[in-house]
Amino acid sequence: MSGAYRIRLPESEGGIPFENRADRLDEVKLVLLMGCPRSGTTFLLRCLAALPRTQARSGILVPERLCHVVGAAAGTDARVEDILWAFRDSLWKAFVSGITSRAFHARDAARHLARSPGALAVLAGRREVELGRFVMAYKEPFMAFAAERLVTHFQGARVLHLVRDGRDCADSLDRAYGSALSDEVLRADGDLWRRVGSEIGVARRVGASMVPWWVAEGRETEFLSAARTERYLWMWSQAVERGRRAGAAAPDRYLEIRYEDLCRDPASSGRAIREFLRVPASRRFDRVLAGARTGSVGIAAARGRPEAGPVEARSLLRELGYLP
């Protein structure tokens, strides 16, 4: 493939084909974009895609159900490292498919004229691809449940954690995916709960129901008695709390962005993101980011949703400044 496009790839050690050198992913500017679903991660990924020499991916490279498996696994579970290496292989092969694509380099040259000579030189085979010059941004909201293990495994990765008011997240989740945490789906005598690989992931049986793994032992009855929106608020609190563990594990490689700040002052948020990722200014990035809208900020209160949920959620809402 690379010969056909005249793209020169870095030398590989020990005769191992370059596409099998997933260990070299740590040389790439890997960005793991996470946050509770309905926090704005899709919009932010679209903004990151506008940066020079950036591949923006989402989908099943890091399967959501396996994020839950990693998050739920005990620290001594040897399978976790195998799963993390599978994630690495998947991300690496996606990255390689991009940097060996003539379309990728041609598009980068056309979008960012100031840096087009470099992209054209790679296309012409006059310059070897320098891994450290490229960004791969990958979005999977449920990576938040395995954030600490991900940031520890991917030594070169930077984590962008997008946090939104949990009440707005819960309201949006209930409207978009309401049935996912419904009594019907959670019935133990059916298999609907197993089909929900995102919100539930893995579960344990409690009486006639299945309870998601992220509900603490002893709190099952409380969770099953909660309204659907409250269950989503419960999930939000767990996703945010676990996502923030990446900051404790690698504070220099973690940036928390508030959805509300992104909408109200996209210029300041964009500047913070670029400085964190150590990428140059980009008018295209700024232009896409400027499209952020404030219309969904405070949507739960506007719809008259009650402020409820587990004590952990209320405590986290206060800590984040969403409740007095």
Image: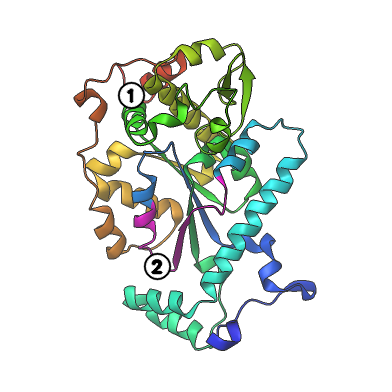
The kind of secondary structure element at disc 1 is loop
- Residue 174 seen in render: yes
Q: Looking at the image, which is closer to me, 133 or 312?
A: 312
| Above or below 222: residue 274 | below
Report which residue position mark 1 lands on.
Answer: 321
Check if mark 2's residue and mark 1's residue have beta carbons within 8 Å: no
Report which residue position mark 2 lands on.
Answer: 52
User: In the rendering, at what x and y percent does residue 115 appear?
Assistant: 38, 76
User: In the rendering, at what x and y percent does residue 121 appear?
Assistant: 47, 85
- Tell me the residue at 42%/20% (across/down): 313
- Which amino acid does the dot numbered 1 rest on? Gly
* Mark sitting earlier along the chain (2/1): 2
Question: Start and end of the magenta stretch?
Answer: 45-63
Q: Looking at the image, which is closer to me, 3 or 228?
A: 228
- Tell me the residue at 52%/24% (across/down): 186
- Crowdedness near tag 1: few (<14), some (14–19) or many (≥20) residues, C-alpha within 10 Å: few
| Above or below 319: residue 144 | below
Q: Quadrant of the N terminus?
A: bottom right
